[in-house]
Structures are given as C-alpha cells and as structure tokens.
C-alpha cells in the first residue's frame, strides 16, 4: 500500500511539472497556427511579432526543450518574413551552430547567408554560402549557393548591365 501511495504521489508531481510546459507550448503553437492561416507575416505584423515573442518567451522558460531547434528556425522564418533579416540571421545561426546535427542545420545556414545578402552584407553572405557548401557538399541547395556566390561578386549596376546584355 505504501508503494502504491508513493507511485500516485510521484505521478501527480510529474504530471503537474509537465502541464505548464505543455500548456505554454500549446499556446505558442496556437499563435503559430493563426499566423499560418494569415499566410503573410508582413501583412500581419502585430500577430507575427506576437508569435516571435511567444517563441522567445517559451525558449527562455524552457531552454532545454527537445524542439528548440525547430522553434528557433520557425522564429527565424517569421523574422525573415517581417524583413528583420539581421534578427532572422541570428535565429538561424543559433540553429546551425547550437544544433549542428539537427535536420534543420543545413537550411538554417543557407537562410542565414540569404539574410546577410538581404542586408547588403555581401562578403559575409559569400562566406556563409561557402561555409554551407563546405559543410554540406551533397545538399540539394549546393548549386544554388554556388550561383549566389558568383552573383555576389557583382555590384547591382553590374548585374543590371549583364541582364541587359
């Protein structure tokens, strides 16, 4: 009887610890779903910022959660959609640097390079694309990264001139 009571108390304590985390994650996912239904972060800036804040708050409260790379990546995507490319690059960096074995690490590194390109950090973008190629030589985006490196050597005026020819 004593063991049964101990087991019941243990289960009660364990489930009460898991509930706040699950409730918090459900809240984040519900906000995320609202944003997905809206389909355009830029046109729904307030909701998108609320989602980013929810990701951030959740990760501060539960820094060791298993889904951390996915939440960081999603945050980067929303920030990129808002045109907050430097903040997005930081989120993508946290994914590929902190979770190099994550299935999202290659894409996070590629997106980080894209974000640098978007804020006119051409050399940083070029170096990041090259890092992507070096780290993931068999990735389907390798050819695209190589093409981006070639384009980054030209100024906007030179690119326009080449497209006209």
Image: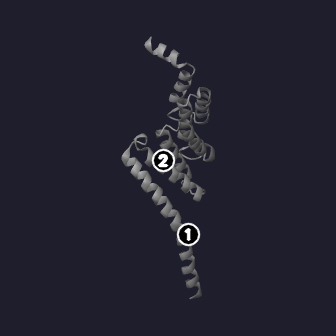
Left or right of 159 in this view: 125: right
Mark 1 → mark 2, Cα distance in angstroms: 28 Å
How many other residues sit within 10 Å of disc 2, few (<14), some (14-19) or many (≥20)? Answer: some
Q: Earlier in the sequence, mark 1 or mark 2?
A: 1
Q: Which residue is mark 1?
A: 17
Q: Residue at 55% across / 49% down in the picture?
A: 69
Mark drawn on residue 49: 2
Q: Position of residue 61 (x, y in %)?
A: 58, 59
Secondary element type, mark 1: helix
Question: Can see residue 62?
Answer: no
Compare residues 161 and 10 and report the one nearer the observer.
161
Q: Quadrant of the N terminus?
A: bottom right
Q: Residue furthest bottom?
A: 1
**Vertical order, 37 against 89 (above or below):** below
Q: Residue at 53% across / 72% down in the picture?
A: 16
Compare residues 139 and 146 and report the one nearer the observer.
146
Q: Residue furthest front?
A: 46
Q: Residue at 53% across / 26% down in the picture?
A: 148
Left or right of 86 in this view: 161: left
Compare residues 1 and 150 and report the one nearer the observer.
150
**Vertical order, 57 against 97 (above or below):** below
Secondary element type, mark 2: helix
Question: Can see residue 78?
Answer: yes
Count the marks.
Answer: 2
Q: Position of residue 63 (x, y in %)?
A: 60, 56
Q: Position of residue 139 (x, y in %)?
A: 53, 35
Compare residues 4 and 89 and report the one nearer the observer.
89
Q: Quadrant of the C terminus?
A: top left
């Amino acid at each position: 009887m004593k063991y049964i009571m101990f087991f019941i108390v243990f289960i009660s304590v364990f489930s009460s610890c898991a509930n706040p985390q699950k409730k918090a994650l459900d809240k984040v996912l519900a906000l995320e779903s609202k944003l997905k239904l809206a389909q355009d972060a830029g046109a729904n800036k307030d909701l998108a910022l609320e989602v980013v804040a929810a990701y951030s708050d959740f990760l501060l409260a539960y820094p060791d959660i298993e889904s951390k790379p996915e939440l960081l990546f999603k945050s980067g995507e929303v920030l990129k959609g808002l045109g907050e490319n430097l903040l997005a690059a930081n989120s993508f960096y946290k994914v590929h640097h902190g979770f190099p074995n994550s299935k999202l690490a290659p894409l996070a590194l590629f997106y980080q390079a894209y974000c640098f390109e978007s804020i006119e950090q051409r050399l940083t973008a070029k170096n990041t694309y090259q890092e992507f190629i070096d780290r993931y030589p068999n990735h389907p985006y390798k050819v695209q990264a190589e093409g981006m490196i070639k384009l980054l050597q030209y100024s906007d005026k030179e690119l326009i001139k080449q497209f006209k020819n």
